Image: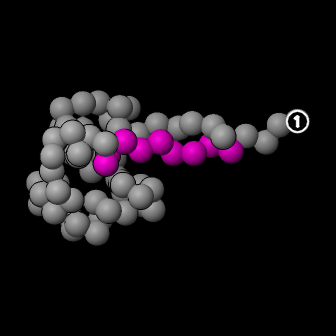
Amino acid sequence: MYNLIYIMLNYVKKYRKILKLRQEDLAESLNVTRQTVNAIELGKHDPSLKLAFKLAKVFNCRVEELFGVGDN
């Protein structure tokens, strides 16, 4: 029997860098703190569904392009 470990994939930092936004800029547009953006990028905080959709709107992409599940 195999024990799969699933990891959360997170591409928020990648999309932020493409748009040349600072964490502060992104945080302001989402009405959250810079610390929240940092925690999301580091995978220490999973955004609410509402915040995930706001992120997707800022980056003009789908939520599935920002977050996913992979196995290790």
Image coordinates for residue 45, horizontal then vertical, percent: 42, 60
Quarter of the figure with the C terminus: top right
Which residue is rendered at x = 41% and y = 44% of the image? 10
Which residue bears the numbered disc 1? Answer: 1
Q: Is residue 72 above or below residue 29?
A: above
Left or right, 23 with reference to 6 = left
Quarter occupied by residue 70: top right
Residue range (magenta):
5-13
Q: Secondary structure at mark 1?
A: loop
**Coloration mode:** one colour
**What kind of residue is marked 1?**
Met
Residue 11 part of the magenta-drawn span:
yes
- Which residue is rendered at x = 38% and y = 32% of the image? 64
- Is any part of residue 31 visible from this angle? no
* Horizontal and vertical percent position of residue 65: 35, 31
x and y percentages locating residue 48 in the rendered image: 35, 53
Q: Is residue 18 magenta?
A: no
- Residue sitting at the far right: 1
**Label 1: how many residues lie within 10 Å, few (<14), some (14-19) or many (20+)?**
few
Residue 8, position as x, y percentages in the image = 51, 45
Residue 67 relative to residue 29: left or right: right
